[in-house]
């Protein structure tokens, strides 16, 4: 288990995967009292750009910019600096970008935050996407290591480069905690309440099981967004997390 003491609300990140800014704003208004952080991903950012980050900040919410940067070090560093200027609280890059990219991303985040006179955001490395399974990692991506070994390999690389943590499925939590320790941040998408459809996710676990295994943050999108009552969906997830 992680030794970080967080409330159920602080652990919960809701993914604003919607195609319109107005819809995102509606969800933020409704859910802000119950949710620790909102995640702006590729869809909403492509639709609305920095305005998507702003609507969360204006409501007093914390922002995870999930733009999964994966490019040459100089390009990633520039993009990281821009997100820091937007005041995000968490951002991510792909561990597969390699050591130099991760180091430059971290330096960029720290330098830009210092320039702005604020604390650097949490910088997180994406490991093996939760939409992949053992077969697709090997056959499509061409990685021969076992899925868990690959996740731990990237988690250790991220930690050595001074990143705060990783994105991985909750199924790899025990291995990550063993390799990287209790304070390393582990953000877990692929969260599905019991009985919910996995959609395109391949490595899923329930909210309760993710927290039991030591998740720092849980990312939930469709189980909340496609519910007829998103507040009820969120409070039910909070109940599950809080019962651990
Ligand atoms: O970086 C992420 O947040 C991420 C990494 C990953 O491996 N898998 C993954 O699902 N995500 C994101 O987490 C969210 C999961 O959404 P749902 O499957 O709808 O709960 C989406 O916004 C994904 O972009």
Image (cartoon, helix red, strand yellow):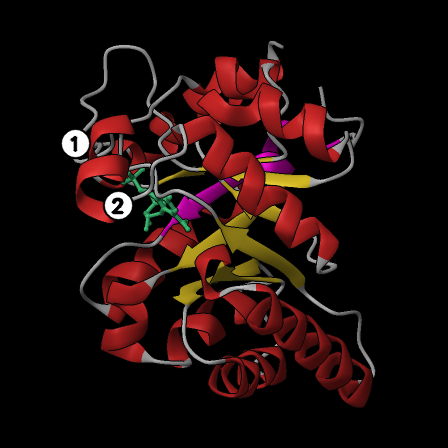
Q: Residue at label 2? A: 142
Q: Residues within 10 Å of mark 2 (few under 14, many from 20)?
A: few
The answer to whether residue 7 is magenta is yes
State ligand 1's quadrant: top left
Q: Say how many tags the image has.
A: 2
Q: Is residue 11 left or right of residue 3?
A: left
Quadrant hosting residue 135: top left
Q: Is residue 109 left or right of residue 155?
A: right
Q: Is mark 1 within 8 Å of ligand 1?
A: yes
Tag 1's secondary structure? Answer: loop
Mark positioned earlier in the residue sequence (1 or 2)? 2
- Residue 171 visible in rendering: yes
Name the residue: 39% across, 42% down.
Answer: 128
**For residue 200, above or below residue 204:** below
Q: Is residue 199 left or right of residue 105?
A: left
Could you tell me residue 145's position as x and y percent? 41, 33
Q: Residues within 10 Å of mark 1 (few under 14, many from 20)?
A: few
The answer to whether residue 107 is magenta is no
**For residue 233, above or below residue 49:** above
Quarter of the image for the N terminus: give it.
Answer: top right
Q: Which residues are magenta?
A: 6-15
Q: Nearer the viewer, residue 58 or 184?
A: 184
Quadrant hosting residue 235: top left
Q: Residue at label 1? A: 199
Could you tell me residue 53's position as x and y percent? 46, 72
Could you tell me residue 84's position as x and y percent? 62, 78
Could you tell me residue 237's position as x and y percent? 44, 23
Name the residue: 20% across, 67% down.
Answer: 20
Tag 2's secondary structure? Answer: loop
Q: CA distance from mark 1 to mark 2?
A: 24 Å
Q: Are marks 1 and 2 in contact (CB under 8 Å)?
A: no
């Amino acid at each position: 288990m992680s030794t970080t003491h967080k409330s159920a609300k602080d652990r919960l990140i809701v993914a604003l995967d919607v195609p319109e800014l107005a819809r995102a704003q509606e969800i933020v208004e409704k859910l802000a009292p119950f949710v620790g952080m909102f995640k702006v991903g590729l869809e909403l950012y492509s639709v609305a750009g920095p305005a998507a980050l702003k609507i969360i900040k204006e409501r007093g919410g914390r922002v995870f910019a999930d733009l999964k940067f994966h490019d040459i070090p100089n390009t990633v560093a520039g993009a990281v600096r821009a997100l820091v200027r937007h005041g995000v609280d968490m951002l991510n890059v792909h561990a597969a970008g390699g050591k130099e990219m991760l180091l430059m991303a971290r330096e960029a985040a720290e330098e830009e935050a210092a320039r702005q006179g604020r604390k650097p955001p949490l910088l997180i490395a994406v490991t093996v996407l939760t939409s992949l399974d053992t077969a697709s990692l090997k056959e499509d991506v061409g990685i021969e290591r076992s899925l868990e070994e690959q996740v731990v390999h990237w988690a250790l690389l991220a930690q050595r480069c001074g990143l705060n943590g990783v994105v991985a499925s909750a199924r790899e939590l025990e291995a990550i905690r063993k390799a990287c320790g209790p304070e390393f941040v582990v953000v877990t998408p692929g969260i599905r309440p019991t009985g919910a459809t996995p959609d395109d996710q391949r490595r899923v676990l329930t909210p309760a099981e993710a927290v039991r295994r030591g998740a720092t943050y849980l990312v939930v999108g469709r189980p909340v967004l496609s519910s007829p009552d998103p507040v009820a969906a969120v409070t039910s997830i909070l109940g599950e997390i809080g019962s651990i």
